[in-house]
Image: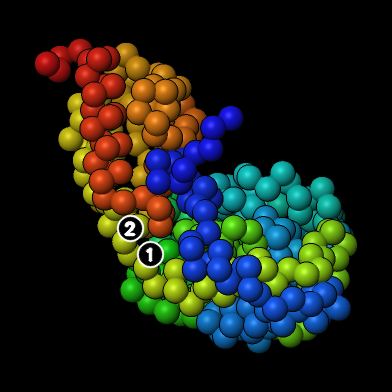
Amino acid sequence: MATIHPSTDFRSDTVTWPTPAMVEAMATAELGDDVYGEDPTVNELETLAASLLGKAAGLFVTSGTQGNLIAALTHAQRGDEAILGEDAHTFCWEAGGIAVLGGITTRPLPTDSRGRMAVDQIKAAIRSDNPHLPHSRLVLLENSSGGNHGAAIEPEYFAAVSAVAQAHDLKIHLDGARLFNAATALGIDPTAITTQVDSVSICLSKGLCAPVGSMLLGSEEFIHQARRHRKLLGGGMRQAGGLAAAGIIALKTMTQRLQADHDNALALALGLATIPGIKLDPQVVETNMVFFDLENDLNLAPEQLIKTLKIDYGLYIGGYGDRTLRAVTHYWIEPSQVDRLVEAIRAIVALHPTPGYT
């Protein structure tokens, strides 16, 4: 299979390659055994991430999914219950790990168009102390909300949920895979959000371009226990400083440039909105994700569009169920590639006209 360069790949920001500066840092990183706590580059990364997110300690983990699972295993016990959104990544896209491996039941609640559970519904979902019922122990939140156009959720929401959680002795974990995108869109420091939660995971890959890895942040005691669960899950990475070196650059530099990705996403949305047969509202594009639909009477299936873009134009986008597609901008996507994608989709759609359009 031919290598797909990320400059033509809009399927996700997970397709990013490390930057040249990251490659150099990885090649020259100082190494040690991280399971023994002796990798200086990993230790530097963990300290840096904890400082940036306003937490006491950090843990380098293999992925956001592993970070979320470790957090749940650390906060809750078998038979406990986690309250979470019905479209949350933890519920929909992580293979049911907290139930399969943690014995933690889930209480999914409906969310609004931005991925927020209603605070009063969270409060109502908390179980009473009844031997017939699981213990409510954990609230799982997400920001940005990947299933909701990458919406950036405001810190006031987290403060409101935190007040409920504290009143009922619940812990809050934030899936912050794209937290820096959310903070950039809101024009705030991420600590305005992370101070409202007990733990947070952030991805160093995706829009931050590191090749592998995520960070899990929380109190010193939480991270102490989380290390045991990382080991349980096979997440001890030994001489991981080469990967951590890229993560340090991700946090120091790549977090500062995300507005460019957001600008490209908005330009893409505005361009797609001019194409007859394409349905989307550019106003919902806040971060680096653009979801759009093919009109029902457009004689073009999503899989046809995806295939034609790939074969005829060397461009890649992703399907998202039914007639919805998704394009995601990232470091490797330039404005010229945004223009290419818009014009390619325009040309393909023109070959499958919607009735009534000329």
Q: Classify 10 Å Cα crowding around label 2: few (below 14), some (14-19), many (20 and above).
A: many
Q: 106 and 241: which one is in front?
A: 241
Residue 136 % position (x, y): 73, 64
Q: 178 and 237: which one is in front?
A: 237
**What residue do we see at 24% from left, 41% from top?**
339
The three-letter code of the residue at mark 1 reads Leu
Which residue is most to the left?
Answer: 358
Count of numbered marks = 2
Residue 40 shown left or right of residue 8 in the figure: right
Residue 235 shown left or right of residue 218 in the figure: right
Can residue 130 be seen in this snapshot?
no
Residue receiving disc 1: 258
Q: 51 and 29: which one is in front?
A: 29
| Secondary structure state at the residue bearing disc 2 | helix
The three-letter code of the residue at mark 2 reads His
Residue 160 % position (x, y): 49, 73
Residue receiving disc 2: 262
**What residue do we see at 34% from left, 36% from top?**
292
Can residue 104 be seen in this snapshot?
yes
Residue 1 % position (x, y): 58, 30
Q: Classify 10 Å Cα crowding around label 1: few (below 14), some (14-19), many (20 and above).
A: many
Colour setting? rainbow
| Disc 2 and disc 1 in contact, CB within 8 angstroms | yes
Point out which mark residue 23 bears.
none
* In the rendered image, the vertical position of residue 58 relative to residue 353, given as above or below: below
Residue 337 % position (x, y): 30, 43
**What residue do we see at 78% from left, 70% from top?**
239
| Secondary structure state at the residue bearing disc 1 | helix
Residue 342 shown left or right of residue 308 in the figure: left
Q: Quadrant of the C terminus?
A: top left
**What residue do we see at 59% from left, 82% from top?**
48
Distance, label 2 to label 1, CA atoms, is 7 Å
